[in-house]
């Protein structure tokens, strides 16, 4: 491997870690920095567009996340393929969402992986196509509905 390839791989892994920390620490500027200005979405959840402005994306995600007390996104098993100024990455995710509730368990966890397409920009690597494959859910599904309701308020 050459140094540029190693550097690119490290930067893309850092990007995915910044993505997770941006959400978990509610650092919306850091989270926004992970995306190209326009994002293609490959999400099977009803109500999401095929393309969205990154600022609008952050507003929607922020609304859902801030309805919760805490989140923790664990990223692992990075697979990265780089072709010039474009890259494909797969990253495993275990995202736990926490909100004490009288509706049952205060946790809802999504287990799956991100399969993203990235581009190299003057500011570094950015996600241009976002895909989350949700393999299974654990815990209180009421919390997932709560996040969806909060996101839908800002559509």
Image: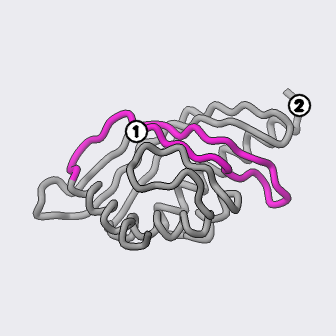
Q: Residues within 10 Å of mark 1 (few under 14, many from 20)?
A: some
> Which of labels 2 and 1 is toward the front?
1
Judging depth in this view, the residue of 85 and 6 nearest the camera is 85
Expressed as whole percent of the image width and height from the top left, the position of residue 132 reads 49, 42
Expressed as whole percent of the image width and height from the top left, the position of residue 119 reads 76, 47
Sequence-wise first label, 2 or 1: 2
The numbered mark at residue 134 is 1
Q: Which residue corresponds to the image point at 16% horizontal and 64% vertical from the top-left? A: 101
Q: Which residue corresponds to the image point at 38% horizontal and 33% vertical from the top-left? A: 135
Residue 112 vertical position relative to residue 71 in the rendered view, above or below: above
Q: Residues within 10 Å of mark 2 (few under 14, many from 20)?
A: few
Would you say residue 138 sits in the magenta stretch?
yes
| Total numbered labels | 2
Expressed as whole percent of the image width and height from the top left, the position of residue 41 reads 56, 49
Scheme of image coloration: one colour
Q: Using residue 113 as the reference point, say whether residue 2 is left or right of it.
A: right
User: Which part of the image, by quadrant, shows the N terminus?
Assistant: top right
Q: Mark 2: which secondary structure?
A: loop
Query: Which stretch did the figure color magenta?
Result: 112-141
The numbered mark at residue 2 is 2
């Amino acid at each position: 491997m050459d140094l540029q390839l190693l550097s690119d791989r490290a930067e893309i892994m850092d990007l995915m870690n910044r993505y997770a920390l941006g959400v978990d620490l509610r650092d919306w500027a850091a989270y926004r920095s992970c995306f190209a200005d326009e994002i293609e979405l490959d999400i099977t959840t009803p109500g999401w567009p095929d393309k969205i402005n990154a600022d609008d994306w952050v507003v929607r995600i922020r609304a859902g996340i801030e309805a919760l007390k805490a989140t923790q996104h664990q990223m692992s098993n990075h697979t990265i393929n780089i072709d010039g100024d474009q890259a494909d990455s797969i990253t495993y995710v275990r995202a736990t969402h926490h909100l004490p509730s009288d509706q049952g368990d205060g946790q809802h966890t999504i287990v799956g992986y991100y399969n993203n397409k990235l581009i190299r920009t003057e500011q570094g690597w950015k996600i241009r196509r976002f895909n989350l494959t949700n393999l299974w859910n654990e815990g209180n599904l009421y919390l997932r509905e709560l996040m969806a309701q909060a996101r839908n308020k800002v559509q």
